Image (tube, rainbow, N blue to C red):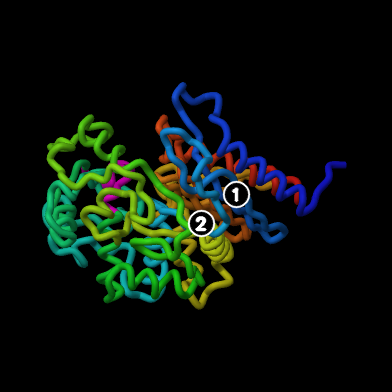
Amino acid sequence: MRERGPAVTAATLQRTADDLAGRVPADLPPGTMPPPGVSLAVRTRRLADSAVAGYRVVRPETRSPDGALPMTPGTAHDLASVTKVLATTTCLIRLVSDGALSLEDTVGRFIPSFAHGDKADVSVRDLLRHRGGLWEWHPLYLAAGDREAALRFAAEMPLRYRPNTGRHYSDLGFMLLGEIVAEAAGQALDDAVRTLVTEPLGLASTRYRHPAGPDVAASACGDRAEMRMIDSGDPYPVPYRSGDFPHWRTGIVSGDVNDGNAFHALRGVSGHAGLFSTVPDLIRFATVLAEYADHDALWKPAVAEEFFAEGPDQGQSLGFRRYPFRLGAERVHLLGHPGFVGCAVGFVPGAGIAVAMATNRLLTPGTPVPTEQLWRAVLATTEDLLEEHR
């Protein structure tokens, strides 16, 4: 009989953390390099454990441990697009539950400059599904001089696609959803997220703009990823060159938001990016969502279930991404979201299963392992752990 128990769970999770921080999957091209550091956690109704490996800060050109700072369970991480679900989507679950807005409300109800032409019928639901037809990305810091002008530019940009003709993952759509949250809540977005999410869910280390303390993972080697996107036009064509912007960061980014639009244009606060958090807070968040029906003081369970339901596009709910997940003989879906810097969070609604991952995958001179590939390895380990503990 296979040995089971807490020690086996801890050892399995630690092996996964060590593997992710120490080797490159065989199917990735030469020049790909693993993240310097990894932090993981899994919690279910029968087990709870975490693991860390590697370093939160290194010299990326050498990957040398000399002078490096170790990853810890309490290290703060730039969540990047995990902000879309932890902040924006969860705020909207609460606001819809409270009757402050409806998923069928048009975007133009809250952002009048969006209410014209083919945008007139685009709804909150459409933006949550990434079906509003907006551009996926645009360097707003090259188009506008301050936060208000940047958001106005995002709202006034012509649509790239006809609404509701397909899913086109859009940072701009979640920037606008962040503004809808602020309007419906009657507060600045960071205050609304604190009032509606982080304080009631007990997420003491989760905040916008900067981490809560000095134990923080460096996130990237300057703004080189966005400079490359602008100069190559890949994956989104833009009418600029990187030389048009004089404020690029060239050193290690640590303690400031990595995302260019969040940092350079939106003062660190946006519906699409900007949050810092720790793996313990991510697990706390995911556990509350996994046990959503036990938290009817926060939201109406039926509203949460509407957000969790599969939409017209495979792998997408309202705000949340959907991942096939093996639960014994049953196939279910784990809901959550990844972030560009290397974090991800997920949960299985009603099953009490919560998973969190944080890495600093961009802190490398080579090609980073994609967040999705790291995340799928963590989910595979979680499936195996659950099988062991049936």
Residue 301 lies, with reference to residue 60, above or below; the image says below
Furthest-top residue in view?
30
Who's the residue at 46% across and 51% down the image?
217
Of residues 53 and 45, the one drawn nearer to the viewer in this rendering: 53
Residue that badge 2 annotates:
75
Using a 10 Å C-alpha cutoff, classify the residue at mark 1 as few (fewer than 14 neighbours), some (14 to 19) or many (20 or more): many
Q: Secondary structure at mark 2?
A: loop
Question: Is 86 or 351 nearer to us in this picture?
Answer: 86
Asked if the magenta segment contains residue 123, the reply would be no
Q: Point out which mark residue 52 bears.
A: 1
Rendering coords of residue 108 (x, y %)? 18, 62
* Relative to 249, residue 27 above or below: above
Residue at left 56%, top 54%? 72
Badge 2 amino acid? Thr
Quarter of image, res 276: bottom left
Q: Nearer the viewer, residue 31 or 43?
A: 31
Write the residue at 46% across / 47% down. 57
Q: Residue at x 23, y 53 (%)?
A: 264
Marks 2 and 1 sit apart, C-alpha to C-alpha, by 10 Å
Q: Could you tell me if residue 390 is visible in this image?
A: no
Pointer 2 local density, CA inside 10 Å: few below 14, some 14–19, many at least 20? many
Q: Is residue 181 left or right of residue 75?
A: left
Give the extent of the magenta segment. Answer: 162-173
User: Relative to residue 104, is residue 76 drawn left or right?
Assistant: right
- Looking at the figure, which quarter contains the N terminus? top right
Q: Position of residue 348 (x, y in %)?
A: 57, 55
Q: Earlier in the sequence, mark 2 or mark 1?
A: 1
Nearer the observer, 17 or 299: 17
- Report if the CB atoms under discs 2 and 1 are less than 8 Å apart: yes
